[in-house]
Image (spheres, rainbow, N blue to C red):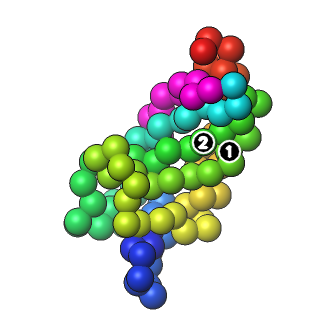
Amino acid sequence: MIKYGDETWTDLIFEKFDYTAERRDAQWVDVELRVETAELTPLPTDVIDYSILAICTHRGDPIQLVVMEEGCDSEYQLTAGEKEQIEAFIRQAGVQANIREAAVEG
């Protein structure tokens, strides 16, 4: 993760994802991700109640990924490697099916 204003960062390695998918409106589905990181890449010590909001289309395409702390935008952002890990998870068949199901349920 990269803290705004920092010039150095660490790529987190995500080992486990838990998520919920909820229809936001006629265009978007919010996927809230809770993650566990590898022991070698722990979260920064100043991060509190961390989650990632993936804003997806009703088809399941991730459009935006936002780091959240305590339900608000964080001062951290994701690295390219972290985004790749998250997008690969979201594109799994089971997750895609849950996103499409959430889109219809709204």
Q: Which residues are magenta?
A: 16-25
Side (left or right) of 43 relative to 91: left
- Disc 1 marks which amino acid? Pro
The front one of 82 and 15 is 82
Residues 59 and 38: in front is 59
38 or 86, which is in the foreground? 86
In the picture, measured across the screen, residue 51 lies left or right of residue 99, that is left
User: Hey, which residue is sitting farthest top in the picture?
Assistant: 105
Please name the residue that numbered disc 1 is placed on. 62
Q: Identify the mark nearer the N-term, 2 or 1.
A: 2
- Residue found 68% across the figure and 14% down from its top: 104
Dot 1 alpha-carbon crowd within 10 angstroms: few under 14, some 14 to 19, many 20 or more:
many
Q: Which residue does the image show at 47% across and 65% down from the upper left? A: 77
Task: Quickly name the residue at label 2.
Answer: 55
8 versus 32 height, above or below = below
Figure check: 18 above or below 2: above
Say if the magenta span includes residue 17.
Answer: yes
Q: Position of residue 21 (x, y in %)?
A: 54, 27
